[in-house]
Image (cartoon, grey):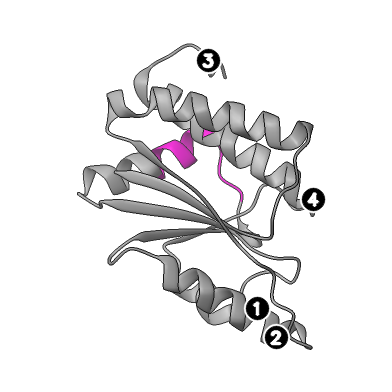
Amino acid sequence: MRIGICAVGRMKAGPERDLADRYLDRFAKAGPAIGLEFSGLGEIAESRARSADERRREESRKVRDTLAEGAALFLLDERGKNPTSEEFSRAIADLRDQGRRHLVVVIGGPDGHDPEFRKAADRTIAFGAQTWPHQLVRVMLAEQLYRAATILSGHPYHRA
């Protein structure tokens, strides 16, 4: 299964980007052995619409336009469920085992996701109840994808 990330907003060069890239590289190397392929990270420019509702709708439309036919969709959103690393890994493995070919994990813009887009998602996931800076969310997602690959392969990186 091909796994990609779609992020609203651009990430500047710096230590956060370097760390996210490091974990994504690790995931790209660890995933193929267990049937997971990293298909890359795409960035979508933040909307410049006047209202938050318009920005959410426009950004969600742009993300939808990038999705492969039949792609599973995980949205990162503060209203989502807060899974453990094992639960996150199992959700990915379940999609893979059901024969899904694509999964896209979406990091929304500053105003979040359009409510209709949230309803269309296979899962809505939160990294806790707190709000996190966009740069740190990318790092946390990259690390969790790598961790998922290690959990599913039985690698000792994840110790609970």
Residue at 49% of width from left, 75% of height from top?
119
Q: Quadrant of the C terminus?
A: top right
17 in relation to 153, above or below: below
Q: Where is residue 116 in the image (x, y as percent from the top left)?
A: 52, 81
Say which amino acid is labelled 3: Tyr
Residue at the spot of label 4: 133
Q: Distance between the residues labelled 2 and 1?
A: 5 Å
Q: Which of marks 1 and 3 is nearer the N terminus?
A: 1
Residue at 71% of width from left, 48% of height from top?
128
Give the number of the mark in front: 1 or 3.
1
Residue at the spot of label 1: 56
Say which amino acid is labelled 4: Pro
Q: Position of residue 56 (x, y in %)?
A: 65, 78
Please tell me whether residue 85 belongs to the stretch shown in magenta. yes
Give the residues in magenta.
Answer: 82-91
Which secondary structure class fits the magenta region best? Answer: helix
Mark 1 surroundings: few (<14), some (14-19) or many (≥20) residues within 10 A? many
Q: What element carries label 1?
A: helix
Say which amino acid is labelled 1: Arg
35 in relation to 130, above or below: above
Say which amino acid is labelled 2: Asp
Is 47 or 72 nearer to us in this picture? 47
Residue at the spot of label 2: 53
